[in-house]
Image (spheres, rainbow, N blue to C red):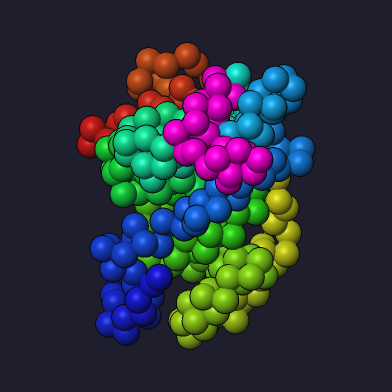
Amino acid sequence: MIELVQNHPRGAIFPRLALVGCALALIALAGCIPAAKEEPGALPRVSEKAVAQYRTGLRYANGEGVAEDHTEALRWFERAAEEGYPPAQYMAGIAYSTGRGTAKDAARAVVWFERAAEAGHARAQYQLADAYLNGRGVPQERAWAARWLGRAAARGHEGARFELGVAYAVGLGVPADDVQAKRWLLLAEQGGRDDARPVLRKLDERMSVEAAGKAKALAERTPTISGPSVPTDEATVRFVQAGLTELGIRAGGVDGLAGPRTASAIRSYREARKLPSGDGLDEALAGAIRRDLVNG
């Protein structure tokens, strides 16, 4: 999944850009459609009708009591998805991204992934990160991809934790940060990602004992969150801090904590962009920074 190159300018870890897609293409489908599971406490309550429609879709997808029919499965998934059920939205996205039961349509897949991702569905967040990282159905935006990777990682998605760790190790979509790299790779390893071990070993070769200890302490204090996405989560704060810094407004470093210097930078940015005054962090602010980064 990653290639270790000794002569990379940052040391020993470097993923070839050509394999970035490989790194994020761990589609949960993998030949078994019911890979989508409801995440306790993480998803909004919906009608029993939507849940029943979703389960009907699963039956058609797997030939359970009916003839296997992926086109019919997608029809039921989309019915439930329209009712606002995130697992169904995710499965509809998977169908369009893989061409199961329909023609491939990356843009339509992103629509469904985004709806589920906003509701807090970790696997949809991971797929949305993949779309933005590789420009599938949307323009390529690595910083925005990293934001969604961070959200999925915070919800315990092991693939997202691994990829976020690698991203921090090489500065892909985020400022390079070995402490954050080791933090997320340790969590990925604890979750069963054995491929994190060689990367961790390479990181240890270039990190001080103090920095490595800080990363371990951060990993130990990292909770697994649930619930809908919010504009004040760590991933978004980091995106805003990094974005403001790139735009020439000092935000006091990229640490994921919305402290006084970040608040001051937000006020300055809002004033310069003629946005509603204040130091609050919301989707409108993140969206404005995103547009400015894209437009250069």
Magenta run includes residue 65: yes
Q: Residue at x 41, y 56 (%)?
A: 25
For this view, does 49 lie left or right of residue 138?
right
For this view, does 186 lie left or right of residue 167?
right
As rendered, which of 168 and 198 lies closer to the eye?
198
Q: Quadrant where the C terminus lies?
A: top left
Residue 275 versus residue 132 in the image, above or below:
above
User: Where is residue 79 drawn, in percent x and y?
Assistant: 55, 22
Number of callouts in the render? Answer: 0
Question: Is residue 103 in sight in this rendering?
Answer: yes
User: Where is residue 57 drawn, in percent x and y?
Assistant: 58, 34
Name which quarter of the figure residue 95 lies in.
top left
User: Where is residue 153 drawn, in percent x and y?
Assistant: 58, 52
Q: Quadrant where the N terminus lies?
A: bottom left
Name which quarter of the figure residue 64 lies in.
top right
Q: Residue at x 35, y 76 (%)?
A: 3
Residue 173 versus residue 84 in the image, above or below:
below
State the predominant SS element of the stretch in magenta: helix
Residue 246 versus residue 21 in the image, above or below:
above
For this view, does 63 lie left or right of residue 223?
left
For this view, does 153 lie left or right of residue 9?
right
Q: Residue at x 47, y 14 (%)?
A: 276
Bounds of the magenta span? 59-82
Q: Residue at x 55, y 27 (%)?
A: 76
Question: Is residue 255 in sight in this rendering?
Answer: no
User: Where is residue 139 drawn, in percent x and y?
Assistant: 27, 38
Which residue of the protein is positioned furthest toward the left in this rendering? Answer: 296
